[in-house]
Image (cartoon, helix red, strand yellow):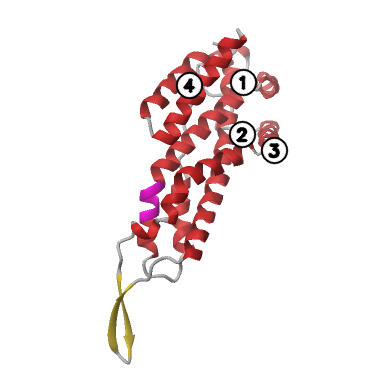
Amino acid sequence: MVLAKAELWQIYNGLRYNFLYNGDINSIHILLNLYDLETRMTNISPKYVCTKEIRRRVRRLLFPRKDRQLISNNITMLIHEDINRLELTIYLEGYKNGFYNNKWANILEDKAIEHYSIDMLYERNFLFHYNVSIDEVKKLKIKICEDIDRENEERKHLTDFITTYCERVIKSKIYNLNMYIDKQLKIEYNFNKPNIKEESYLSTKEIRDLYKMIVDIIIKNAINLYKEASWFGINDRVLNRYI
């Protein structure tokens, strides 16, 4: 039985790798099907938020360049699929972490029983997934998030996973950004005479700052996504006990 589980995790890791690094869409569909069979994962709804923040922050970082909007658009076009794959993978990992966490599932079930009858639990499709208005539930979610942060501080498993992916997939695209940018013409006036010239290429420092900023944004948002997915997984685990 131990060998079977080990082989199953190898399959999971292989499918995840093929999806992340080779862009194999079939791998993620197979992985989702396996997760559904193994754990009845149903409430999977990742939110893709990194790209929007990157676009906004790039424009701010490159001020006052006239072509900052163009550069922002080029960056998001280059890496948005890579980021989306990472966000989906992180979400699934977080969900799985929450679904298999019996400690928090047991605690959350106690809270659920305090607020819902057993009959109601059998009928619900959602528990506290979106509703954390109850103070005790809100505090519990905060503790779960703090627990994830504490574990990541000790093991660096999430930070290292995200950083490694960025180094292997995203870094080269950002560091070669000048190859992908269409040069824009800008007009400068000198003694009321127009001087038309091209915008300068991004400097080494600008590119380095861009990459660091992008990685920081991805790490922050991906870890928050992991927390949200874990919360969903814990809630679904409780509901699965009443199917």
> Which residue does the image show at 59% across and 28% down from the upper left?
128
Q: Secondary structure at mark 4?
A: loop
Near-viewer residue (187 or 166): 166
The residues colored magenta run 74-79
> In the rendered image, which residue does mark 1 sit on?
100
Looking at the figure, which quarter contains the C terminus?
top right
Amino acid on which the number 1 mark rests in the picture? Tyr
Residue 137 image offset from top left, x and y in percent: 67, 31
- Residue 77 is inside the magenta segment: yes
> Which residue does the image show at 44% across and 54% down from the upper left?
174
Q: Earlier in the sequence, mark 2 or mark 4?
A: 4
> Which residue does the image show at 37% across and 49% down from the upper left?
78
As measured in the structure, the alpha-carbon distance from the residue carrying label 2 to the one carrying label 1 is 21 Å
> In the rendered image, which residue does mark 3 sit on?
146
As measured in the structure, the alpha-carbon distance from the residue carrying label 2 to the one carrying label 3 is 16 Å
> Which residue does the image show at 53% across and 50% down from the upper left?
215
> In the rendered image, which residue does mark 4 sit on?
42
> In the rendered image, which residue does mark 2 sit on?
132
Please tell me whether the stretch drawn in magenta is mainly helix, strand or loop.
Answer: helix
